[in-house]
Amino acid sequence: KENVHGTNHPKLANTYNSIGGVYCQQGKFVEALKYYNKCRVVKEKALGSYHPHMAVTHGNIGFVYMKQDKYEEALKSYEKCKIMQESSLGPQHPNLASTYYNIALLHKHQNRKKGDTLKYLRKALAIYDVSLGQDHSKTKNVQNKITEVERDRERE
């Protein structure tokens, strides 16, 4: 694709993203991160740093960092993703809820204040309730995670 479209074409970014996804599924997170970052660089050049399509890339990078237990880096990526999603998708989009959920998991893994974890879980739940319904598996998953965090909080 580099030869056909050049090194800054969004289609090349999509190819890098797909390769990163394959490596991620294989658990090869160093390679996945390499390709997700290549995707990010191409997208930034082609679309700009704050284009809505950048949110997915930052989310993918955040996911890889989370899998590598690099929670601070993951949080930075998810925060970028969140800001872009809030402005481009609106406050009730399920993708934003997924990002809130991932931020909550990061707070939980880092043993941050349970209140911060619950705040993001409740934001995710509110969106999923409206956009997907109470019976959807993602909604139920967040409800279960809230119950788990509240139980942990009571034990402390």
Image (cartoon, grey):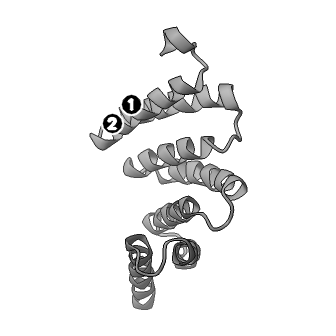
Residue at position x 57%, y 13% in the image: 6
Which residue position holds label 2?
22
Q: Is residue 34 above or below residue 153?
A: above
Q: Position of residue 154 (x, y in %)?
A: 43, 91
Residue at position x 60%, y 63% in the image: 93
Residue 156 visible? The answer is: no
Within 10 angstroms of label 1, few (less than 14), some, or many (20 or more) residues?
A: some
Q: Decide: marks 2, 1 in contact (CB < 8 A)?
A: yes
Query: Quick one: which residue is furthest to the bottom in this view?
Result: 154
| Residue placed most toward the observer, 115 or 134 | 134
Residue at position x 54%, y 59% in the image: 95
Q: Gap between marks 2 and 1, in whole Å?
A: 5 Å
Identify residue type, mark 2: Val
Identify residue type, mark 1: Ile
Kindly state the secondary structure of the residue where label 2 is placed: helix
Q: Position of residue 49 (x, y in %)?
A: 70, 36
Residue 141 visible? The answer is: yes
Kindly state the secondary structure of the residue where label 1 is placed: helix
| Residue placed most toward the observer, 44 or 107 | 44
Q: Is residue 156 above or below residue 32?
A: below
Q: Position of residue 41 (x, y in %)?
A: 59, 28
Q: Is residue 68 above or below residue 7?
A: below
Label disc, if present, on residue 19 of the rendered structure: 1
Query: Quick one: which residue is furthest to the left in this view?
Result: 26
| Residue placed most toward the observer, 6 or 25 | 6
Within 10 angstroms of label 2, few (less than 14), some, or many (20 or more) residues?
A: some
Residue at position x 59%, y 21% in the image: 9
